[in-house]
Image (spheres, grey):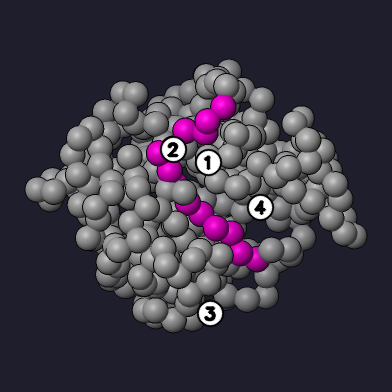
Amino acid sequence: MLGSEKDAELSYKLLSKDVDASYDKWFEGGVSRDNYKHTVIVDAHNRGNLTGDIIEVTYTNLSRSSYRGKKISKIIATFSNVTQENLSPYGISFAIYSNPYYGFWYWQSSKITVNYKFYDENNHLISFDNTDNSWITIGSLNSGKGRYESVKLNSSGRVYGFKDSSVTIHNGNTLYSDKANDIGSRIGDNWQTTYSSDVTSNYPWGTNSWDKGLDDPHAYYGAGIFKVNGNGLNVTYGTKRAVFVNPGTWATISTTIPKSSSGIIPPTIHYHRTNVALLKLL
């Protein structure tokens, strides 16, 4: 399981000459300052795509994360291949929390890839074995009001949806909702539909938002799940926009499975295995 590591330390190695990185210059994003010690923010020198590896960050001093009884003592995440949002006049930037539980924010971009590697207390690379211990939940996949968020599994594993979720499987390895599910939108509308002001969102259970964390009883409505294997977890986070709205997206990964009776639904399309890996923190 991946716990909240509020005392985690964060170091980084810059891998691209096209960006600058700053330590502890950004403390925002809606996460309480008590829940993390440091941040790293990355800014592109110019507008345009960032190709190849950009920055490698290492999370250490972990105490609340483990896998099959083995302590996870270190996580290394490599950020790469960020696609410029065509509708934005500004350059790409993204900011990483030292607590891996809270993930990172990215701005002015439509795609960003992260490769995660996990190490045990003996500094051995951990391999996920595709058992019932290897479920990774992808939650908070908002859609509507001119944008939708997605996550693509690039390493080995299999993608599933939850019964009655708005999020469905696309192309065998990508999760998103192509219908509006976001609070303030008309549920079931096309994701591209915009409104002059927020409207009342009528969900199957009422008007309360599902997007309050994976402990919410309706969190499954904006979530999907991966069963993963292999020693590298590789994910592409994406935000597609019809209009230039909400230039920032918060990306997280988690091992918490939403508490509901929604059930897990296997893919209905033929899934061909690809070299893809994924992890989820929330």
Q: Which residues are magenta?
A: 247-260
Membership of 195 in magenta stretch: no
Q: Where residue 95 is drawn, which disc sits there? A: none
Mark 3 residue crowding within 10 angstroms, few (<14) / some (14–19) / many (20+): few
Query: Quick check: marks 1 and 4 in contact, CB under 8 Å?
Result: no
Look at label 2 and name its amino acid.
Answer: Thr
Foreground tag (1 vs 3): 1
Instruction: Name the residue at 44% across, 81% down.
Output: 25
Which residue has dot 2 on it? 256
* Side of 178 where 36 appears, left or right: left
Q: Secondary structure at mark 4?
A: strand
Q: Secondary structure at mark 1?
A: loop
Query: Quick check: marks 1 and 2 in contact, CB under 8 Å?
Result: yes
Instruction: Name the residue at 51% across, 64% down.
Output: 31
Look at label 4 and name its amino acid.
Answer: Lys
Look at label 1 and name its amino acid.
Answer: Leu
